[in-house]
Image (cartoon, grey):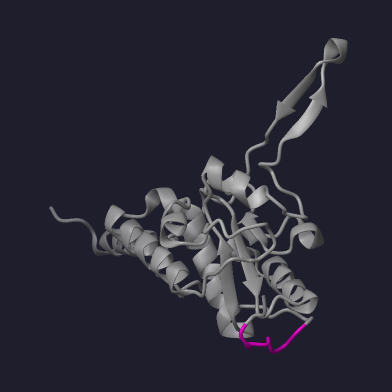
Amino acid sequence: MGFPRVLLLLLSAAVSAASTVPVGADDVPLDRQANAEHRAFAFLKSLPREWSGTSNRDCKTYEDKNVDRLSSSFAISAAHFLRAFVDVHGQVTITSAHRTAQEQACVCEGEKGPCAGRARIHKAKKGRRIVKRSISRHQLGIALDVRAGTGTEEEFTCMHEFAQFNPQFGVRFPLGRRDHPHMEPIAGRISKVRLVVLGSIQHSIIPCTKLKIMLTDDPLD
């Protein structure tokens, strides 16, 4: 005997509903995940990239090799965020991505702002001094330095606001004015980023209130 028509309709509805439930990173088929990663890295590498000029020398931490070493989950979040920001407010330049320990030490030379790779002397017992170096999130592949527009205070404030107003992208600027360009994933969100096709996030985008239109002139060094 076949299933009653009502039961068949209920089963069909259940299957249809299940197929439309948004999925997280752990549930996405490998082919879609690989495609999302490819699009994200390709977009990041399509953005202008150059030395920030804040350290003693150009350590070249913005090259393809540095972008390629970013965490895939963070790269996808960053690409979504920067794509939306560019669409709404204008130009963005990547000035640093992943860094090796040697690159981190290079960046810290002459850097006026906070720098995790800079050696610090700690006093131990009996007057001993211990040299310690912390690890930057850049070395973990979960940080990007990005410049908004020409790098004015207002433009950076706009970018920080844009991240705050649009938490669906999963990024933040935790150091604020102490290190304007430094972007990281929101704690607890990096493993839960939805791997969707770049540009297809369904949330409404809220522009910053500081600037409605960003300047797009070539940045000055």
The spot of residue 151 in percent (x, y) is 71, 75
Q: Quadrant of the C terminus?
A: bottom right
Q: Is residue 43 left or right of residue 11?
A: right
The spot of residue 128 in percent (x, y) is 81, 16
Q: Is residue 35 left or right of residue 122?
A: left
Image vertical order of residue 20 relative to residue 137, above or below: below
Observer-nearest of 41 and 98: 98
Which residue occupies the extreme right position in the image? 127
Q: Residue at x 72, y 66 (%)?
A: 164
Q: Residue at x 72, y 68 (%)?
A: 160
Is any atom of residue 154 visible in this view?
A: yes
Q: Is residue 21 left or right of residue 186?
A: left
**Principal secondary structure, stretch drawn in magenta:** loop
Q: Magenta segment: does it hold 216?
A: yes
What is the span of residues highlighted in magenta in the rendered image?
211-218
Is any atom of residue 188 visible in this view?
A: no
Observer-nearest of 90 and 185: 90
Q: Magenta segment: does it hold 94?
A: no
Q: How many marks?
A: 0
Which residue occupies the extreme left position in the image? 1
Q: Residue at x 62, y 44 (%)?
A: 105
The spot of residue 52 in percent (x, y) is 64, 66
Q: Is residue 54 left or right of residue 23?
A: right
Observer-nearest of 116 and 167: 116
Image vertical order of residue 115 relative to residue 221, above or below: above
